[in-house]
């Protein structure tokens, strides 16, 4: 009788434990199936594209709630669990994403970890100034104009980039770029200066030295050439004219340099402007202007480094956008009367 009692008690304990474990097992099975279904199933069977911006410093809970609100994931809590299980919670990149509601959670997480953010294309025309570039970036919502201008005129930052000047005017290479929204202005600027370095490297610096000029002086000259003509074939010839004037200590008398030195220029260049002295007025001052007057492209840089040997000292614009070149002042004055019948260009 005594031995039968413990056996009966053990039987009851086993039955009790079984009744306790079965629901737990069933719950675990249900949770596993539910999670497996979550991992394998997109948020929507009818996929749509959704733009999601993940600000810098966004916490995982805030991100998952945002993704659920955007309809990209079905359940924020489950996506948090997935991110933590995969050790990805601290590896999600900030930025602007184009996501699909047709992505499975694991695919979505991989995109966020890889940082597959949207890159927006922006093209800076040759001859744009810092101010114009800032306005273009602001118009495309890629950077605030004031922050971009501040970065390009921060002396310490300019020097960190290896440019010995007071600003980066002339060193922001005009080209087509692809930038993400939310990038610091300094990152955009750094990319543009790096691109400039690809076109003006050690070989070009040697060329500048052979001409008797520094890199900065060549960039200044290239910026003036850029503003003086849009005709590519004329650029080396115009550079040659300016070189001749510099060698002979004749003032460059370039309208674009004067315009650059006028605050809030209204488009009407007057005699008063030409007679008002400034560091950029090449009518009142000899030599190159105080600094670059725009950001020249590769062709203008190449022209400044390889000016065409020429006897010309003057040029005047013709109605078709090209220029008439002259070797003497008498020839030039006649050309002005013929082509413009206005005040002479120089």
Image (cartoon, helix red, strand yellow):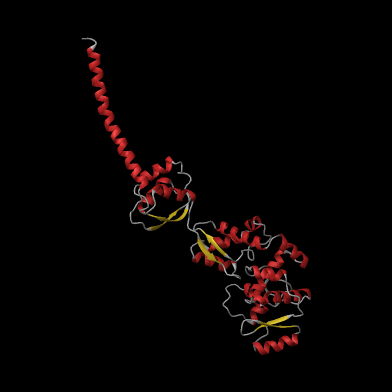
Regarding residue 289, the answer to whether it shows in the image is: no
Of 149 and 54, nearer the camera is: 54
Residue 15, given in percent of the width and then of the height, sits at: 24, 24
**Left or right of residue 230, residue 74 in this image:** left
Q: Is residue 239 left or right of residue 9?
A: right
Horizontally, residue 56 falls left or right of residue 312, namely left
From this view, report whether residue 110 is shown above or below residue 292: above
Q: Residue at x 27, y 32 (%)?
A: 23
**Closer to the camera, 24 or 92?**
24
User: Image quadrant for the N terminus?
Assistant: top left
Q: Position of residue 26 (x, y in %)?
A: 28, 35
The answer to which of 326 and 30 lies nearer the viewer is 30
The image shows residue 154, relative to residue 39, as above or below, that is below
- In the image, what residue occupies the spot 75% across and 62% down? 206
**Furthest-top residue in view?**
1
Viewer-closest of 17 and 138: 17
From the viewer's perspective, tell me whether residue 213 is left or right of residue 228: right
Q: Quadrant of residue 303?
A: bottom right
Q: How far from the left and from the top, in percent, is residue 170?
A: 64, 66
């Amino acid at each position: 009788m005594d031995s039968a009692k413990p056996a009966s008690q053990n039987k009851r304990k086993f039955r009790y434990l079984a009744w306790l474990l079965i629901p737990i097992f069933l719950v675990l099975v249900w949770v596993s199936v539910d999670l497996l279904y979550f991992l394998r199933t997109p948020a929507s069977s009818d996929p749509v594209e959704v733009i999601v911006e993940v600000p810098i410093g966004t916490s995982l809970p805030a991100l998952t709630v945002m993704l659920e609100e955007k309809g990209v994931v079905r359940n924020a809590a489950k996506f948090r669990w997935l991110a933590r299980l995969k050790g990805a919670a601290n590896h999600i990149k900030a930025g602007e994403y184009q996501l699909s509601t047709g992505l499975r959670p694991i695919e979505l997480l991989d995109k966020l970890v890889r940082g597959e953010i949207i890159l927006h294309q922006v093209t800076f025309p040759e001859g744009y100034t810092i101010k114009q570039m800032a306005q273009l970036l602001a118009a495309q919502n890629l950077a605030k104009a004031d922050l971009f201008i501040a970065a390009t005129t921060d002396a310490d930052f300019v020097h960190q980039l290896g440019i010995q000047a007071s600003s980066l005017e002339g060193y922001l290479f005009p080209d087509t770029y692809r930038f993400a929204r939310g990038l610091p202005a300094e990152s955009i600027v750094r990319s543009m200066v790096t691109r400039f370095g690809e076109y003006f490297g050690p070989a070009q610096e040697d060329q500048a030295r052979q001409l008797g000029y520094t890199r900065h002086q060549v960039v200044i000259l290239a910026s003036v050439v850029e503003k003086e003509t849009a005709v590519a074939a004329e650029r080396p010839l115009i550079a040659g004219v300016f070189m001749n004037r510099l060698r002979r200590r004749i003032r460059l008398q370039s309208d674009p340099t004067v315009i650059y030195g006028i605050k809030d220029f209204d488009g009407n260049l007057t005699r008063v402007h030409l007679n008002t002295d400034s560091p950029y007025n090449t009518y009142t001052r000899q030599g190159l202007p105080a600094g670059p007057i725009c950001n020249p492209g590769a062709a203008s840089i190449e022209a400044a480094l390889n000016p065409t040997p020429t006897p010309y000292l003057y040029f005047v614009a013709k109605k078709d956008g090209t220029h008439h070149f002259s070797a003497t002042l008498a020839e030039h004055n006649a050309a002005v009367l013929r082509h413009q019948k206005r005040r002479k260009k120089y």
